[in-house]
Image (cartoon, rainbow, N blue to C red):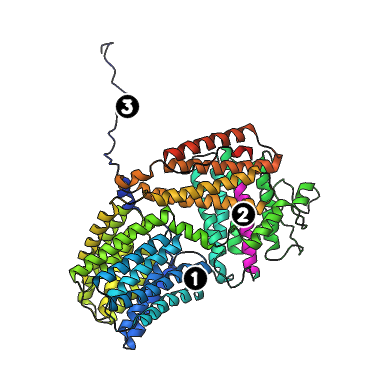
Amino acid sequence: MPPRNRPRPDRSPVPVPRPFSVALPPWLTHALRAQRGPVPWNAVVRGALAAGPLLLAAVLAGRESVGVMAALGAMLAGINDRPGSRRTAVHRIGVPGLAGAAGLVVGTYAGEGLGAVPLTLILTALGLLAGAVSAVGPVSSGAGTQLLVAAAIGAGMPLPEPGWQRALFFLAGAAWLIVLRLALPTPGALAHDFRFDGERVAVADVYDAIAELLAAAGGEQAGARRAALTAALDHAQDALAGPRLRRYASSSAERRLRAQYAAALPLAEAATALAWAGDALPARTAEGPRRLAAAVRTGEPCGPLPAPARSVPGLRALDDALLHAAETFDRGGKKPGGQQGDSQQTDGTKTRGDKAGDKRGAALHSDTGTNPLDRGARQTAHKGLRLRPFRAKALLRTVTGAGGREYGFRVALCYGASAAVAQALHHVHWYWLPATAVFLVKPDLGPLVSRVLNRAAGTVLGALVFAGFAAVLPRPEGLVALVAISGALIPVATRHFAAQTAVVTVLVLALVMVGGEPEASWSRIGETLLACAIVLIVGHLPAPGQRGGNVKARLTAATDAAHAYLTHVLSGADDRAARWALRREAYRKLAEARAAIDRAAAELPTLARHTEGTDEVAATLERLVDTTTACAVHLDDTGRLTPRHTERLATLLDELVEQRERAGLADPPADDLLSA
């Protein structure tokens, strides 16, 4: 018989060794990060029809140098050809194109009439100007980049045409891409007015983002969904506010889209307040915004909208906003007073035209315009969300402020140093060195080390690929085809800086050979590595004034916008249009500050330490704006704040003052705003 005291086998779980993992530093993880998304086939088609056909026409006409300039303008315009509305594309592509043409004129005549030292001084001054202007925004940054790149090319590329002709053909290349952007419809958009397909997609994305935020309320993803809603609203606002010949919308399709965007603002406000409350919501709460998003995309009626239970102020505000959106979608592009639909039967809820509906529904959707929600939406749809129009003083203050000075100093020093070194080497392609330094030194294109690593890797890959093609392709027809293929790949390659650099390197080397110069793959690699070394050295030199100026300037602007919004809400003003505009500006400024902070945090520690603590300030500001939105919704419903709201505001304002002082931000905001 077996012994009774035999030890039992140990059945405790055996620890499984975890796989070895290494935490990469932020500056390296940023270099490996790439954007994701579907292939923009419409932009791919435009890229294939831009630089390649222009170069082919010039080659057939025997004017290769003209084709090189036109293709160069189309290529740089293709880098700025991003998703959005057609009117926005005109501004995003056209302004940098004009700046590039001006740079060609200045660079060509300066290169012809000045020696090496005066030319270097002129280019350095241009770098100071372009760098300071880049602090204004993305379009200004693109304009500054093209100004400097074109100035270096004009000063160093040997072409027979005078400066004004180079600029004219460069501008023609950019204009050709704008024509393609305006004329070619997006696939699948022909069922509607394809002129507004970008605006339609942007507005539909807003309703989808609202639905995602409602679905994420009470969960860990609520903060990320709120940030996604901010990005969608910013994109739609820019798409609808592009340059126009008339001040106001002139077509029913545009009026309908502007009204649908305005109807999304109270929905976004209610969704933000519900997410702030932290309670999970029923799944049917997000169904209404999803149906509205589908209606925007298809142009069909939105159908029945499931309404939430009106149990708390946030849900009551959401229900009111859904009813208002239903009326807006029924009305379409018509002015108030037209024939109204009666299809919005909700599941067990009150509806317009239903005798079971109460006076609230009738008052909310009356056409008298006396309801604050309806009046605010009409004003927003008519005038837009821009509180402050373009002012020269504000622009000058941004250019000469801390962010502009820091941008300008870095760009001028790197651009001027690379131009001086390139001319001292007496290389035939000396203009490549300063042109490469421009893309490396621009702070808004990503962290410094990330840009350098990607630029070096992309240039080596692109030069090797081109060397292989150049050895087997017939000339010039093979090179023209290579230019067309590279132009088609640019919209896809912009998702990663190294990929974009590789494609642009192939395209530029092909243009150089078509222009009559020898194959220059190996010299291109050498000059790129030299430019990387110059920018790395200059980028880490001590700078006059305060480092991190761009981050702190944007954070200060976000603080001012947040407090302006809070003051308006606590004042008890019933102007919904102004409140929504202030809320949009606060969230937009916060998003810009957060992007700058994230870029600065991915720098090497010697640079990242200058912006330590700014992420805490941004996080507190985000919570403050979210709380202000919740206060606005609660004040609309009850006319007074709860102790939870007031205590939360007081706590956040105290934290904000302390965090700003620790981060080295001057002039901390006053903490007595609760008395407003």
Residue hosting label 3: 13
Above-or-below relation of 201 to 618? below
Residue hosting label 2: 264
**Residue 470 at x, y = what percent?**
22, 75
- The residue segment tinted magenta is 252-269
* Residue under the point 51% across and 44% down: 622
Residue lying at the far right of the rendered structure: 355
Residue closer to the observer: 280 or 11: 280
Please indicate, yes or no, whether residue 45 appears anywhere in the rendered image: no
Above-or-below relation of 531 to 276? below
Near mark 1 (Cα within 10 A), the count class, few <14, some 14-19 or many ≥20, is many
* Mark 2 or 3, closer to the camera: 2
Residue type at the position of mark 2: Ala
Task: From the viewer's perspective, tell me whether residue 383 is left or right of residue 421.
Answer: right
Helix, strand or loop at label 2? It is: helix
Task: From the viewer's perspective, tell me whether residue 672 is left or right of residue 428.
Answer: right
Tag on residue 90? 1
* Mark 1 or 3, closer to the camera: 1
Near mark 2 (Cα within 10 A), the count class, few <14, some 14-19 or many ≥20, is many
- Sequence-first disc among 2 and 1: 1
Helix, strand or loop at label 3? It is: loop
**Residue 505 at x, y = what percent?**
28, 68
Helix, strand or loop at label 1? It is: helix
* Mark 2 or 1, closer to the camera: 1
Q: Quadrant of residue 407?
A: bottom left
**Residue 338 at x, y = what percent?**
76, 64
Q: Quadrant of the C terminus?
A: top right
Near mark 3 (Cα within 10 A), the count class, few <14, some 14-19 or many ≥20, is few
- Magenta span: chief secondary structure: helix
